[in-house]
Image (cartoon, coloured by chain):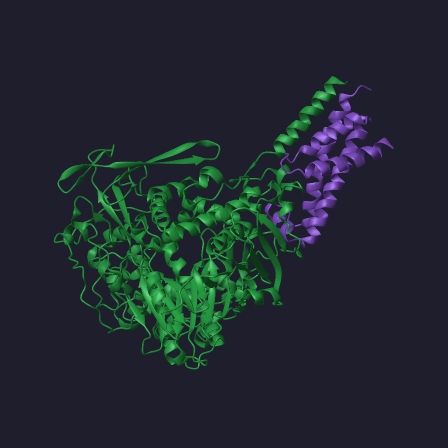
Amino acid sequence: MRIVPLIISATATTALIVVLNMQLPVGTGKTPRLGYFLSPQQGFWQNAEPADLSFDKNISIKGINANADVYFDDRLVPHIYANNDTDAYFIQGYLHAKFRLWQMEFQTSIAAGRLSEIIGEDGLKTDKYFRRLGMVYGAEQSLKALETNPETKAATDAYTNGVNAYISALKENELPFEFKLLDYKPELWSNLKTALFLKFMSFDLTGQGDDDLWMTNTRNYLGYDTFKKLFPERADSLDPIIPKGTGFDKPSIAVKIPANADSVYFHKNDQGITATPPIIPNKNNGSNNWAVSGAKTKSGKPILCSDPHLGLNLPSLWYEMQITTPTHNTYGASFPGAPAIIIGFTDSIAWGVTNAGRDVKDFYDIKFRDTTMQEYWFNNEWKKAEFRTETIRIKNKPDDVETIAMTVFGPVMYDHSYKSRNEDGRYYAVRWTAHDPSNELFTFYQLNRAKNYNDYVAAILPYQCPGQNFVFASVSGDIAIRQQGKFVAKWKHQGDFVQPGTDSTYMWKGFIPASENPQMENPLRSFVSSANQMAVDSTYPYYLGRSGNFPVYRGYLINRKLSSMDNITPEDMERMQTDNYNVVAEFTRPFLLKYLDETKLNSEEKKYLDLLKTWNLRNDIQEKGSTVYKVFWDSCYKQTYSDEYGKSKLPLYWPEQVTFVEALLKDSAYAFADDINTVDIKETWKDVVLAAFHKACKTLQKASNEHKLEWGVFKDTYVNHLLKIPALSRLHLPIGGGGEMINATTANHGPSWRMIVHLTDKVQAFAVYPGGQSGNPGSKYYDTFIDSWVEGRYYSVLFLKKQEAESNSRIKWHFSFVKA
Amino acid sequence: MKFITAIILTALLSFAFGLFTVLPWWSFAVTSFIIAAAIHQKAGKAFLAAFIAVFLLWAILVFIIDNANQHLLSVKVATILPLGGSSFALILLTAFIGGLVAGLSALTGSYLRKH
């Protein structure tokens, strides 16, 4: 034995293995454990799926009551045929896990405020936010409601068992790619995780309620009078979901504005409190849906269209599938993380959803006796607070413990230990309907089994949060729409700002009975539609929330188009869902051109003006005029308001686009056109527009030099991996559209599931989503549909009976579940 | 002859133990060590035999995987790591790391035996 070389060599070998077996810091992140990650038999190579992989399988499994079959079609869409409902949900859970396990685990970790366990300290900010908002608390409440209902309990239990059957049999080498990359392992699924996932959707779709804090700042900064002018009640161009002039019954709850609102709530004559929430969900969250009755279609049968607009991510939020059991036959988009189909159709009916955008989250200013938060002042006495402890585990670091005071309003989200950004030392409690027990899953469970209009109404009536516009059409010829949710009976402007929390005066006084929610069945105009606009005109007896939360123009355009259409075919609907027509530009271009003094432009600038003048008003990918318009428009907006907003250090809301549009169109002497920084000159639209155009041309010149003048390149849409890793994302997608277009595709947001259902006797459907059925970046099915989605193409959906599935030429694989 | 035998046995055992995914990824370091101790060669030769064995084994394994996968994942990983998106570079890196660990283990194994 040669001792010295032996020791050196043994040390070197051990050191090498140790280094290759740990995560090394690189920049702000960490490498995977390289030795493990690169190991051909264990690491990421095992996730590199053969392109010709067969998904045929016979699996003997415990937990199902009878044998069941799954047929995968050529797009890897599974068609489940089970003998009973619980087996179907077991298999749905199994398939979600098989194809989307990492995303299920990751998304529910975020919702539960457990990101720090995975990525370490960098996740702490997000975790604190969700814990303090009461996401886990809300999910626990929902779980109780879900488990009280025997049907949703059975469905979710079976689903959870299915997910866990997959996880338990998972071998190290089969772990999804991202687990290997980030070096952690999935835990077992639970019903709570399903509740957390659904709660996350509530957060995403009712997040606009957080704007109380920003709006409060904005009002304080501008002063009440100026604020009122920049944030008007409602837009003139609004075409509500329920047509103007419909009329409403007398409200069952009388809402009354508190007597002292002018001074303690609106702060009409003084400064109020300020605060800043650290995270606000994407304000663009929106959607389109509509249904036309047989009177408007070529076939004489209804057509229903739905395209929810959400953040564009890989793996996709949606997983497409068919579920067939003796009780129902349903197809559509499901959430990996929850049982049932969320948006889809059965052999009798179809449904789709858009976000209602109603304000169901309010903040209250709480007065505590001292910083221990033991007692708070409420209705003329000191009241004891309860406490909820949230322990955030952090990878490789000690735990962070959040102690959250609970008041009659709800959890105190902001306190001295978790200050809003401006750190004013106040305490804000949050009242949010998502904290109340509710069972949204039951609505989808029943919709999956609905046969007619009455079933649809019964299914959606108990639905609470997030409020949605449920559109409906049936083979029997009915169409309908209902805005459903647990909505607060609010007085006008209640909850626009932070409310006083020292007594019950400003508390919510009740919820609007579902029978008084906006709804419409088989209207004379033969269509129903929604696109997140305000649901009703000003005669509706309750307050919906501030108008800025309700976009106007998509809804307007959809209604204008549908009114003029006849003999509609599914192909017409495809063209409409992917339509890039810019109706805002149609309204505003003439005014911009009217106010722009051409004689003051140089030759270079005139070139851009010509592009704008000759533009066809479509935001198609090759249009340069669209880019000129966008840059010019944004520049005008900034030019108009930046003087008013320039001096604030706090984040503030700027006026809504529709406010600016209507000012330009209707107010030739708009007060805000004047630059308040120039004392002796009074600027007008002409000055604003000219200055804005000069500035815009500089931006356009730069874009032109970089060959980014064409709209598709300029907008630069991408579908982002959930970890925001470019290599796993799809970048630079040539797709048109934009915020206020029906094809509402912005840079990283847009139609997340396009569906068209033709309710002929045998239901036909066409669908596409920007993703793929497999969540594995190493699978060729990871992003299969993205190119079709970009080009506005749809897949003709296979909606098959079992005997048909066995022999259909587009069915490629058979996955057989055998009862063990 | 010893050299060839060592290469074949090292590769074989590395592969066989690698099939047991409950074992840590570095199980082949142990088998390479044992073989180098059992089939005694000079230090340099022992290192080289194990290096070649696992380098080739890993290179072939991932080459087959990568081809069947039409380079879908290797290109992505080679962009993350970062290797300029080159599948070939990623295969080389993989094989080199395997070879190096095996080689050093074998070196240690060979020193264990008296001359």
Please name whichever residue, A810 or A741, is drawn nearer the observer in this view of the structure. A810
Question: For the N terminus of chain A, which image quadrant?
Answer: top right
Indicate the position of residue A445 as horizontal and vertical percent values. 40, 58
Please name whichever residue, A317 or A121, is drawn nearer the observer in this view of the structure. A317
Total tally of numbered discs in the picture: 0
Residue at 46% across, 76% down:
A616
Colour chain B is painted in: purple
| Residue A705 seen in render | yes
The outermost residue toward the right is B1
Indicate the position of residue A276 as horizontal and vertical percent values. 31, 47
Indicate the position of residue A783 as horizontal and vertical percent values. 56, 58
Residue at 38% across, 63% down:
A354
Q: Where, by quadrant of the figure, is residue B82 drawn?
A: top right
Q: Please indicate whether residue A2 sits to the left or right of residue A747 in the image.
A: right
Indicate the position of residue A809 as horizontal and vertical percent values. 63, 67
Q: Is residue B100 above or below residue A143?
A: above
Please name whichever residue, A678 or A164, is drawn nearer the observer in this view of the structure. A164
Q: Where, by quadrant of the figure, is residue A341 drawn?
A: bottom left
Q: Please indicate whether residue A97 sits to the left or right of residue B69 in the image.
A: left
Please name whichever residue, B81 or A90, is drawn nearer the observer in this view of the structure. A90
Q: Please indicate whether residue A655 sits to the left or right of residue A754 in the image.
A: left
| Residue A650 seen in render | no
Chain assigned green: A
